Image (cartoon, rainbow, N blue to C red):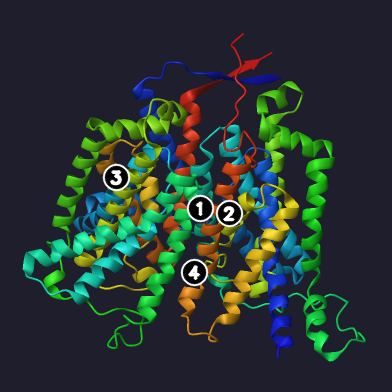
């Protein structure tokens, strides 16, 4: 007999755990499409997670917390943008430094907020709703219906980003900067401005994901709350081949594994500490798979990804 | 109105480079001090703790060296991978696993007095190498992004240490704390008045060896060639596989060595978070490697500087009741400003008024 409650629980957790991954991965897809790698995702997420909690405690309004979280995510990403786009610095080292700054600042400023718990986001108005369904299907429907609004919004965002990247003028300018900034510039695109915009926009989504992590999932501030989720999201970008809709699928795949590792705790004879390794091991595995695929299909990364572009001039 | 023009510099004197890097380092530290002052710290006290005391007071100098040695050993290895254009940030995990392996040797083997330390160090080195092998192989064979894989290996290493200290290796005599038994005295490396003299000698030997490898060996030349232009290096018949694998092995070995040295001479046991053998020094070493400008001999002043800053940062933390994040924040600020400095070395800005 299949335990429907258990399956319902699994679906519920997966949908919820996927939200930070979806938002962060989609945000990083937009950033990388412009030719900039932001390895500061982990740092942006954790700063947003703290700001989300503080803003929500002060304003008692979750929307304020989420939006301010997104905003500081964008600000920290723009610091990385300033160093790498304007100063043309090494994007990898700068991203690592951005993450260090994020982890350091939150550890310092977050001390007073450890354990200050919040009520958690309310389920959407769809719940409770008496649906005429057979009992064995109810846990499944409840798992989908009993989510907060952000869970549904997080599904729409990658679709919107698909439209933004592939159907709008700004989106194609961003992609042009990622493929060949010299040609983009000659066609009248301001590469520096476009890249900064893509980094800021991506950082905003990453920040939203970080704020949801503390507000929607954990329900309080904990030091090192992200525990590598931001890095996992950067790995998922390659797995989604820089396409927002695939980022959605990749995030659900990763979230289902994370939820599974939670649910297996205490149920099987594997130590919690080994179960905790699952997302990290999976990320390594999918990066390896993607690399094999990329060799075969020659598909993938924006051509100018990671390469600084500085418009030099002649004196005169 | 005025306009800013970006012009490339074609000839850059080494003195100008040095001045620019030093300025950027000072800017990074200044930003950190500014942040601390905004948090309510006394600026004089911060400067005193960061720069004056670690270099003038004997007690502080001892602690600075205690941090500087592992930072320098690890950063010497990182310098080699970075020279190859490989961005490994896995030293933290490799260091942790080096300590775990050395601890395993100390708990299970029974050997005579000098051999036991040497064997434990070698086992630690092996641990560091093993932990780097998976990212190294994936990079060498499939060109898998090493930043992410090495970082994932760090998280996995943390989980492994947690498993051991909360599980099979937890000491029944540690009053409920997740700590392992102290290693047998035969395996400990003595310190002299708190100064890890032997470790420091190992460090100078490591600096000498990295100098030989990077400046005088064929491998060092090939590593540099790959770092500067991978396609030219490949076209001239150099083996990518060999360069990646060997540079990873060297950096893993040195990180493992540092972990084993810290365990045998200072910590004597494994523990969680702030009691851990690594103390986050594997990340600080990244900053030291970039400060040295990837020059082996510059590693001695660079690691002493970072050791002093870690010591000073932790002192500020204790005085102001802050958290370990102090060191992370300082590292990040310094690293950001020294990578941004590259711009001012390669380009100059001309402001034209009209």
Residue shown at the point (34%, 37%) measured from the top left? B294
Output the chain of dot 4: A
Is the residue B269 above or below the residue A308 in the image? below
Residue shown at the point (36%, 76%) measured from the top left? B164
Q: Are marks 2 and 3 in contact (CB under 8 Å)?
A: no
Nearer to the camera, A270 or A235: A270
Residue shown at the point (17%, 59%) measured from the top left? B195
Tell me whether marks 3 and 1 sit on the same chain.
yes
Output the chain of dot 2: A
Q: Are marks 1 and 2 in contact (CB under 8 Å)?
A: yes
Mark 1, residue position: B148
Is the residue A210 above or below the residue A138 in the image? above
Output the chain of dot 3: B
Tell me whether marks 3 and 4 sit on the same chain.
no
Query: Residue A247 placed where, x, y %?
Result: 70, 55
In-image side of A93 versus B266 (left or right) = right
Tell me whether marks 2 and 3 sit on the same chain.
no
Earlier-in-chain disc, 2 versus 4: 2
Q: Is residue B153 visible?
A: yes
Query: Residue A124 placed where, x, y %?
Result: 84, 75
What is the number of the mark on residue B76?
3
Q: Helix, strand or loop at disc 3?
A: helix
Tell me whether marks 1 and 4 sit on the same chain.
no
Q: Are marks 1 and 4 in contact (CB under 8 Å)?
A: no
How far apart, in angstroms, are the residues tagged by discs 3 and 1?
21 Å
């Amino acid at each position: 007999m299949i335990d429907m409650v258990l399956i319902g629980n699994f679906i519920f957790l997966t949908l919820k755990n996927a939200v930070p991954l979806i938002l962060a991965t989609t945000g990083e897809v937009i950033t990388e499409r412009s030719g900039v790698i932001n390895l500061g995702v982990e740092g942006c997420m954790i700063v947003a997670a703290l700001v989300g909690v503080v803003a929500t405690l002060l304003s008692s309004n979750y929307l304020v917390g989420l939006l301010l979280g997104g905003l500081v995510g964008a600000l920290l990403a723009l610091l990385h943008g300033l160093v790498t786009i304007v100063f043309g610095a090494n994007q990898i080292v700068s991203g690592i430094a951005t993450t260090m700054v994020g982890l350091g600042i939150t550890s310092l400023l977050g001390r007073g907020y450890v354990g200050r718990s919040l009520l958690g986001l309310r389920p959407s108005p769809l719940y409770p709703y008496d649906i005429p369904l057979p009992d064995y299907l109810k846990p499944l429907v409840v798992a989908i219906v009993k989510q907060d609004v952000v869970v549904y919004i997080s599904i729409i965002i990658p679709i919107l980003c698909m439209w933004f990247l592939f159907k709008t003028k700004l989106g194609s300018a961003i992609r042009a900067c990622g493929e060949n900034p010299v040609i983009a510039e000659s066609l009248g695109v301001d590469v520096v401005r476009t890249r900064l915009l893509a980094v800021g926009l991506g950082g905003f989504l990453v920040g939203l994901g970080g704020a949801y992590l503390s507000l929607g999932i954990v329900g309080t501030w904990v030091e090192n709350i992200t525990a590598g989720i931001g890095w996992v999201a950067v790995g998922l970008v390659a797995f989604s081949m820089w396409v927002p809709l695939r980022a959605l699928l990749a995030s659900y795949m990763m979230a289902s594994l994370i939820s599974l590792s939670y649910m297996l705790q205490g149920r099987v004879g594997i130590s919690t500490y080994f179960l905790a390794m699952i997302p990290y091991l999976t990320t390594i595995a999918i990066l390896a798979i993607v690399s094999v695929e990329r060799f075969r299909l020659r598909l993938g990364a924006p051509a100018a990804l990671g390469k600084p572009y500085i418009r030099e001039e002649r004196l005169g | 109105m005025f306009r800013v023009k970006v012009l490339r510099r074609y000839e850059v004197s080494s003195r100008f480079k040095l001045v620019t890097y030093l300025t950027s380092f000072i800017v990074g530290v200044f930003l950190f001090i500014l942040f601390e002052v905004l948090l309510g710290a006394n600026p004089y006290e911060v400067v005193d703790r960061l720069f004056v005391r670690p270099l003038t007071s004997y007690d502080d100098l001892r602690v600075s060296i205690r941090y500087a040695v592992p930072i320098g050993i690890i950063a010497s290895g990182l310098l080699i991978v970075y020279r190859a254009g490989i961005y490994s940030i896995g030293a933290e995990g490799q260091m942790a696993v080096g300590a775990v392996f050395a601890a395993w040797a100390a708990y299970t083997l029974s050997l005579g007095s000098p051999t036991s330390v040497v064997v434990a160090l070698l086992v630690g080195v092996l641990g560091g190498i093993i932990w780097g092998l998976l990212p190294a192989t994936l990079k060498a064979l499939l060109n898998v992004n090493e930043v992410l894989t090495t970082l994932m290996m760090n998280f996995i290493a943390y989980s492994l240490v947690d498993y051991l200290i909360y599980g099979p290796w937890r000491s029944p005599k540690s009053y409920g704390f997740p700590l392992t038994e102290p290693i047998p005295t035969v395996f400990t490396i003595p310190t002299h008045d708190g100064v890890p003299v032997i470790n420091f000698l190992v460090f100078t030997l490591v600096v000498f060896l990295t100098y030989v490898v990077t400046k005088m060996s064929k491998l060092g030349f090939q590593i540099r060639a790959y770092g500067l232009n991978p396609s030219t290096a490949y076209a001239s018949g150099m083996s990518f596989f060999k360069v990646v694998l060997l540079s990873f092995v060297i950096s893993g070995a040195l990180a493992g060595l540092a972990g084993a040295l810290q365990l045998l001479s200072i910590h004597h046991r494994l523990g969680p978070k702030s009691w851990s053998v690594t103390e986050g020094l594997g990340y600080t070493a990244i900053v030291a490697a970039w400060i040295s400008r990837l020059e082996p001999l510059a590693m001695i002043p660079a690691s002493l500087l970072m050791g002093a800053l870690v010591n000073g940062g932790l002192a500020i933390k204790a005085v102001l009741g802050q958290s370990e994040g102090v060191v992370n924040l300082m590292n990040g600020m310094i690293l950001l400003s020294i990578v941004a400095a590259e711009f001012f070395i390669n380009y100059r800005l001309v402001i034209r008024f009209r």
